[in-house]
């Protein structure tokens, strides 16, 4: 019911379509800075795309398990999770759960076990490409795989970068927003050189934009000057409905489809979908 209501409110005429890509787009949502909106972005883009006919898998790669919580997917101790895939070579399909209430959306949850993976991975064979292998071996076909990264540049994030073709960087419109970004870009370049030549930064999304501040505007200009057309036109405003939604185990897209947070994520998802079929995104990230 909520899913149908969301589609009716966000896309009343049914005019907007989110075309399915002709191959799976694996997108790593990364920024080692904490609290910039990685998980919120992952959850809401995934829901918006799934509600418009795309088959979407969310891989929760953060021991905090926020994406699992946001999608209302059980992830208490004992639930098979992404840790079992990375460390015990369990097939991804055995730990995947359907997201209740949203057709076409699945989630690989993270339990607290994943906290140990960063250290345990160090001594595992092919430690950087465990997730890539698991995703490649997945028999089901997805249009999108979103990987929600933890706020660090450790082996979990490296696994996500090796598994992905695209990096989506959410940037919070705040002072210090660009600080640390160089480090992320350097890591992406290293992974591209040594482990995954197809990797590129395809998408930048500005989050928590507060139009009342001149600072937000300055950050937006800075980011647009620096990253050009990788930056989505859609900008996510700071919106209290966005922050309320997870406590109801929902995305803002279904929790309050009329809110500015929901409409912005809907627009961002539409842009991502259209870019995926129009232009092969430029090679020089
Ligand atoms: N547009 C928004 N408006 C208001 N609050 C937001 C918005 N986006 C995210 N938040 C809130 O900000 C906090 C951080 O967001 P989120 O968890 O998505 O960031 P994160 O980058 O995944 O954090 P972490 O680095 O800890 O994984 C959350 O409490 C979330 O609800
Ligand atoms: Mg997060």
Image (tube, helix red, strand yellow):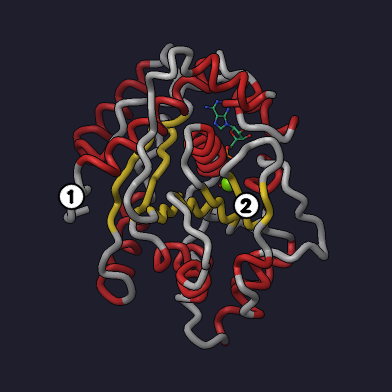
Task: Place residue 272 in its image quadrant.
Answer: top left
Q: CA distance from mark 2 to mark 1?
A: 29 Å
Q: Can residue 36 be seen from the camera position used here?
A: no
Badge 1: how crowded within 10 Å, few (<14), some, or many (20+)? few
Q: Which residue is drawn at the image coordinates 45% and 70% (left, top)?
A: 136
Q: Earlier in the sequence, mark 2 or mark 1?
A: 2
Between marks 2 and 1 in the image, the one whose residue lies nearer the viewer: 2
Left or right: residue 222 compared with residue 237: left
Is residue 171 found left or right of 140 in the rendered image? left
Quadrant of the image occupied by residue 268:
top left
Can you say which quadrant of the picture contains the N terminus? top right
Classify mark 1: helix, strand or loop: loop
Seen from the viewer's position, the closer of residues 203 and 54 is 54
The dot on residue 267 is: none
Q: Which residue carries the number 2 mark?
A: 107
Please determine whether, in this image, residue 247 is positioned above or below residue 261: below
**Foreground: 215 or 153?**
153
Identified at 38% across, 47% down, the residue is: 168
Looking at the image, residue 257 lies above or below residue 250: above
**x, y percent for residue 233:** 30, 26
């Amino acid at each position: 019911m909520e899913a149908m209501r969301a589609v009716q409110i966000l896309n009343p005429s049914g005019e907007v379509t989110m075309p399915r890509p002709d191959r799976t787009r694996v997108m790593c949502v990364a920024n080692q800075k904490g609290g910039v909106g990685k998980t919120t972005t992952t959850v809401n883009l995934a829901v918006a795309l799934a509600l418009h006919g795309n088959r979407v898998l969310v891989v929760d790669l953060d021991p905090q398990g926020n994406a699992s919580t946001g999608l209302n997917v059980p992830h208490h101790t004992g639930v098979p999770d992404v840790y079992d895939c990375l460390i015990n070579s369990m097939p991804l399909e055995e730990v995947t759960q359907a997201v209740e209430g949203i057709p076409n959306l699945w989630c690989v949850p993270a339990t607290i076990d994943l906290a140990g993976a960063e250290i345990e991975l160090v001594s595992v064979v092919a430690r950087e490409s465990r997730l890539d292998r698991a995703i490649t071996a997945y028999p089901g076909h997805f249009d999108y795989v979103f990987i929600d990264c933890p706020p660090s540049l450790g082996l979990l994030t490296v696994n996500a970068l090796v598994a992905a073709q695209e990096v989506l960087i959410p940037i919070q419109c705040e002072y210090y927003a660009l600080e640390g970004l160089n480090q992320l870009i350097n890591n992406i370049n290293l992974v591209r050189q040594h482990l995954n030549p197809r990797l590129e930064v395809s998408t930048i999304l500005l989050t928590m934009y507060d139009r009342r501040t001149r600072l937000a505007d300055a950050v937006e200009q800075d980011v647009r000057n620096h990253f050009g057309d990788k930056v989505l036109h859609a900008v996510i405003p700071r919106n209290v409905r966005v922050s309320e939604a997870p406590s109801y185990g929902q995305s803002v897209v279904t929790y309050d489809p009329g809110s500015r947070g929901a409409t912005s994520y809907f627009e961002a998802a539409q842009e991502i979908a259209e870019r995926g079929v129009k232009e092969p995104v430029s090679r020089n990230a």
